Image (spheres, grey):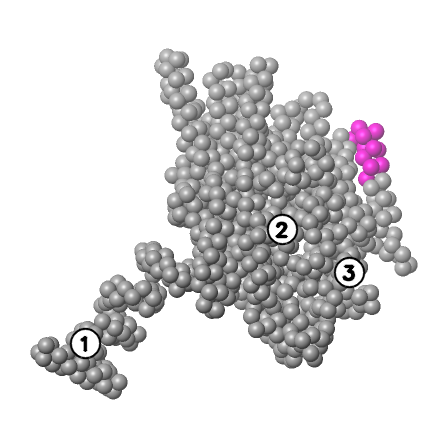
Amino acid sequence: MQEKRLRYILGAGIFVCSLGLYLLTVAPTVSFWDCGEFIATSYILGVPHPPGSPLFILMGRMASLLPTAADPALRVNLLSPLAAAGANLLAFLIIVQLVRIWRGGLETRQARLVAYAGGVIGALAFAATDSHWFNAVEAEVYAISTFATALVVWLIFRWAEAADAPGQERYLLGIAYVLGLAIGVHLLNLLALPVIALVIYYRKYPFRWETFLATVGITLGAFLVIYLGIIKGVPKVLAVQYLGGNVGMYLVGVLVLVVVGAAWGSIRARRQLLAVSLMAVVLILVGYSSYTMLYIRANQDPAINENDPSTPARFVSYLEREQYGSHSILDRRSVWMESRQDPNAYKADQVNSPLEFLWEYQIKYMYLRYFGWQFLGKTDFFNPQHNEMVDVAQFWFLPFLLGLFGMIYHFQRDNRRALILLTLLLMTGLAVIGYLNQPDPQPRERDYSYVGSFMAFSLWIGLGASGLLELVQEALEKRKQRLTNWISYGLIGLLTLAVPVQMLAKNYHSHDRSGNYVAWDYSYNLFQTLEPNSIVFTNGDNDTFPLWYLQEVVGVRKDVKVVNLSLLNTHWYIKQLRDYEPRILPASLRDETINQMYPMQFKAQNVEISVPKSEQNPRGNIRFRLEPTYQGQGIRVQDLMILRILQENLGERPVYFAITVSQNNKVNLEDFLRMDGLAQRVMPYNLEDPIEPDIISDNLFHVYQYRNLDNPDVYLNNDIRNLLQNYRSCFMQLAMHYYQRGNMDSTRVVLDRMHTAVPEEMVPFTNQDIYLQIGQLYAEAGEPEILRTRLDEVLQRPNINYQRKLSYGWLYASVLDDYAKADSIFTQIYNQHPNNGQVVGGLLHIYESQSQWQKAYNLINRWLQNNPGDQSARELLQKYESRIEQSAADTSGG
């Protein structure tokens, strides 16, 4: 009893400590990627992107009603810290269980020390891993999914302990219910099925190949029953029609009643195995029933209703993710070949076979790299406090080595349970890689998908700590007990500092979301750019989902119609633009017409859109040339719909493109786009100036919020830093406007405001040319030292090619009049590239500017020795010879 009490006290401590850590670092409001969508759909009980996460949406709705925080987003965010801390608690309990199994109990104080110390170290190490911590501080499904996986693993080990006791079936039935519920969050939990099967097999049967293979077959059968029979099959039964009517609902009802009846009958007949199996199916169905929420809400037309799964057929399409297309798990060649065609591919065009692509990209880059993030540390991390890229999260291999030792030691002490952990690691890691067959590139990092695998290795970290303690105790067995205790405590302290504490300390800054309001502010600023009753075209998740959050949860700018270009290729979304308020497509656009819209053959042609007549456009239309947008010979549905939306609304409502929209998605409207800030307005006439300075200046200086962008304690990851460059793009457009009109004072004011709003110390420039261009503008505005400082800084960067050094040399000479510095740069390059005409020309320019005719003569003479046929060089030689003679004459005459 005392042992159990101590275990629960330590477990509660793990939960409280990790929860406190996550609450300190949780995002204070909406974040990027799917978070805005999940929070908004939770708040209004909407339908998120396929295949949906209905249980998460229901939990999010309940969380949003609780008075836990003023910000509704934070209320939903808090689900993740709770779930992640719960997973850490379960990791502790699992480690303790595994140690108890290999030791045959925890009867002595030393045995409990071994188990509990390992449990604490392993659980805290898992708490501080990169991806698990990332998932723990935002409103996403992965923390809850990880908790469900940990719960299933803990329950099956608990069953193994009580397998011979009355009522042990409750653990198996609990597992079935958790599996069913977890389907309503994410399908990753199903990967724990082989772990469940192995625990049952090793607990009930001695190892023989025939029984082991039979267990594998039964496990595969169970997976197929759940995945194909329930997850995929039930929705397809819903879509069954007979005599023109839908009978699927009745069939599903009959099937459920049959299963329940069979379970009840088997219980009455005391057929235990059949009863447990059928009851497990019933409980999985009960858990899976959360998906009915999506069907019910889709029929009520919520403001966010992705794919509109309001009919059985559409519901099946939704669950099958048909919107995203599909590719074969086995056809790896097609995925590789398609990836090679992508200009942004990372590895696909560097490998020579599908097998090499599997290894180099899908395994090494998309899994082993993420594995290294957890237990080796991240590299190339930007630290704004030192304004440099540093390897701040290097763990000196200690977590990895301790986990590796734990795996080896576990196999030595208890190879069966070690094989079970290895199965968990492989099924939630490499098996996911094999199943997904991911193309190259991915729109974002996918490390969050493999946290179950990282948890498995973290368990070995804990077991490694237990193993080391056990070896120490065995080595000191004949020593005094006090000495053994002190050495054990010292080792525990050392391992705790070396692994979980080090991981926490080095990961803290990069995982601290407190004070990060970028997603909220950026979306708010985009909305404030728009005139009332506007339409704005957005590009993807990060410039759409936070807008949905602000509209549906906060109530900001409900007058604006947000049109996502990625979704604009789908029929259901076009219908919603027609039917949902505010409507931007006419009712005359019939369903039959929309359903027939697909990419089509298209040749470049002139396009004309009617607009109200004005002084700037008396003819009442805008004309532009539309080029093919689909594989060079076709046009996408989104492009046709942009034209239709413009035709229907341009005279009635302001229309904008978010500046995140790429050029090839703007249907060649560049001559009519005016930048007003974070959005470009489609104007009904040709523009002479691409900005309206008063509008953009008011937005940048007086309207936009830039909360904490100057705070070095707030971590900004690569995605955020790249997005923030859009602010700079706006400031630069305004600065160039003033510069081109000779207004240097206003140019300098804009540049200064840009630096205070988006400090370079926090958000380094991704484009080196723009970084120097700003220095040139400052120099033109009377502050040349800023350009000099920037030039001196970039010259210190490693691996600068000589073409860039040449451009720096020209800036020193032509803008700063620093011919000595320019001379040293060009001379250095000339020594390496003496036959480069551009370098020689630069040096000649410098010599001529300083009347160094002898140096110019010597240089061109050396050039002619290698290029005797260069007539222009001979003319220069004569010119310099004449200047030398003239200088000598002037000197002698003086």
Which mark, by number, is residue 524?
Answer: 2
Amino acid type shown at disc 1: Trp
Amino acid type shown at disc 3: Arg
Q: Which residues are magenta?
A: 259-271
In the rendering, at what x and y percent does residue 339 appear?
Answer: 54, 63
Pointer 1 local density, CA inside 10 Å: few below 14, some 14–19, many at least 20: many
Give the residue at mark 3.
583
Q: Secondary structure at mark 3?
A: loop
Q: Relative to the observer, which residue lies in front, 85 or 333?
A: 85
Determine the residue positioned at 48% across, 60% down.
Answer: 746
Which mark, by number, is residue 525?
Answer: none
Label 1 vs label 3, nearer the camera: 1
Amino acid type shown at disc 2: Tyr
The answer to whether the residues at label 1 and label 3 have Cβ atoms under 8 Å apart is no
- Which quarter of the figure is the N terminus placed in? top right
Which mark, by number, is residue 853?
Answer: 1
